Amino acid sequence: MSVSNLELFKLKPSETTLPLFISNIQAGFPSPADSYLEAVISLDDICIQNPSSTILGRIKGDSLKDIAIYEGDIAVIDKSIQPKHSDLVVCAIDGEFTAKILHIDNTGIKLIAANPKFKPIIIEEFTEFKVWGVITFLIQNIKNRSHAWNY
Amino acid sequence: MLGIIDCNNFFASCERCFDPSLLGQPIVVYSNNDGCVIARSEEAKALGIRMGMPAFELKDIVKEHPVRMFSSNYTLYGDMSRRIKHMIRQFSPRVEDYSIDESFVDLSGLELINLFNYVKNMRDKITQGSGIPVSIGVAATKTLSKIANRICKKKYRIVGVYIIDSEEKRIEALKATIVDDIWMVGRKISSKLISKGILTAYDLSNVSPAWARANFSVVLEKTVRELQGQLCIPLEEKLKINQHIACQKSFGQLQSEFEPIAEALANYVARVAEKLRKQKSVAGGIEIWLGTNSFSKTDTQYFPKISTRCDVPTDFTPYLIKLAMEALKSIYKTGLKYKRVGILLTDIRPKSDGTLNLFHFTNREKQDKVIYQLDRINMINGRDTLKSAQQGFNSSWKMKQNHLSPKYTTKLSDIIQIS
């Protein structure tokens, strides 16, 4: 077993207002590592480019199973991003939020599910259609899911 | 130039942003206790639903039209407001947050670029990024920018931007605005103006500032000058120390016993003390009041009020609760049906002021440590995770919120669902 393709980082909690070291330093020999401390990595910084336009959403159903997105996953949605061809987008259809792959070519715009069970939705000309937001990151609870694997 | 950014039907738009089934539907948002209408979508306005309309008057309209009703979800509106204000600062470094859904922005220094394109881009980015449609009015003064914003909402809603940048546009805008609709002109003043034959903003802009000051006030003088295009009311960027921190809510149901009223009051005290600490102030005293249901024709009416002083100006919740309880005991009478209790903090001053009482020993440092930890724990784990026992667990006094929507942006179990 190899972990060579993994780089390990230390993570900080997302509450950036909390000081890293709260305790008073007592007398004694100072730690030699003190002068090597660097700011730690934040998950927020990685997953959230625009905090004020980012919304989280919970995935329901299996319409995205072919791209390994499952029920219960948490999607990080950025509303400020201009959607492009093949982005995974959230749209409002028939009064509900739905996540689809945006397909744009010279024949028009289609919304495609990642599951053959669902038919693509073709956006007709002159119908009002708006992308609500673009999914940029996904949070999956792998530990909870691992028991279902056949390995 | 100055701009005002105003969210269109803010509360209703917040509800609609997170619930696509509300697209094109009439929406109303009720005040605390679901009493009366405080926000409406355009569709609701078209049905003749007025601002401030009591909930029971809506019954007939609701029977015929599918009006969607909401209790006010201030957690959601507050967070959306914070997000929008953050976005605004990416376009203009100088901003005055005027209310939950309005901000003034400084747009000076943009002479070399196309102002309309800049503001239009700002408007589109904020609208897209927040999901809340906004309108921006731009002009030489705050008063004129408010007028520009009204015109924008009425005539250029789709564009979302209107700029008064020429003398012709200023005059045209003033002529189209009645005095009632001028910023900072209240109903009393407008009716007095009308009786003097001043009907439009244009009429008002033609009086002499000296006349306005002599016959009305220096406030109206400033309004006249601002309408003429002379900047009198500058942008106030710094948050002013709030001199009035109060909390009063009506009970969900009438209360007669002391305990539930005391519990409600303790919770209100906790809220105002939190606000006090947030602005780094202390209070020198408190005022407590009780009230019966003034709408009832049969109940005995009683509206007592009491003021009391702190030994030392403080922001320490347990002390303020104790003081409030003593005050409440002295005005509470049995056998009455109470509708509300309230608290006002008085003599608010900066905490750094450091007034102490010669005859009183208070270990301020210890209190500060305790309350700092309490605020920290509650910030991470949610409000009232740690609270004073007096705040209790009985909630018969809590307000009615029968139509509350989820806290989409602040609570993980409430986030939107995507199929």
Image (tube, coloured by chain):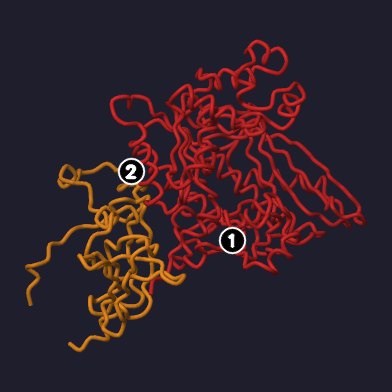
Q: Identify the element where label 1 is drawn.
A: loop
User: Residue B384 versus residue B144: which sits nearer the camera?
Assistant: B144
User: Residue B81 versus residue B205: which sits nearer the camera?
Assistant: B205
> Circle 2 is placed at which residue position?
A24
Residue B366 visible from this viewpoint: no
User: Is disc 2 in the same subunit as disc 1?
Assistant: no
Mark 1 falls within which chain? B
Query: What amino acid type is highlighted by mark number 1?
Result: Pro
Frontmost of labels 2 and 1 is 1
Q: Identify the element where label 2 is drawn.
A: loop
Mark 2 falls within which chain? A
Q: Can you say whether B188 is above or below B81 in the image?
A: above
Residue B321: x, y in percent?
Answer: 66, 47
Residue drawn at (26%, 77%), measured in percent from left and top?
A: A114
> Circle 1 is placed at which residue position?
B26
User: Residue B192 versus residue A35: which sits nearer the camera?
Assistant: B192
- The residue sitting at the top extreme is B210
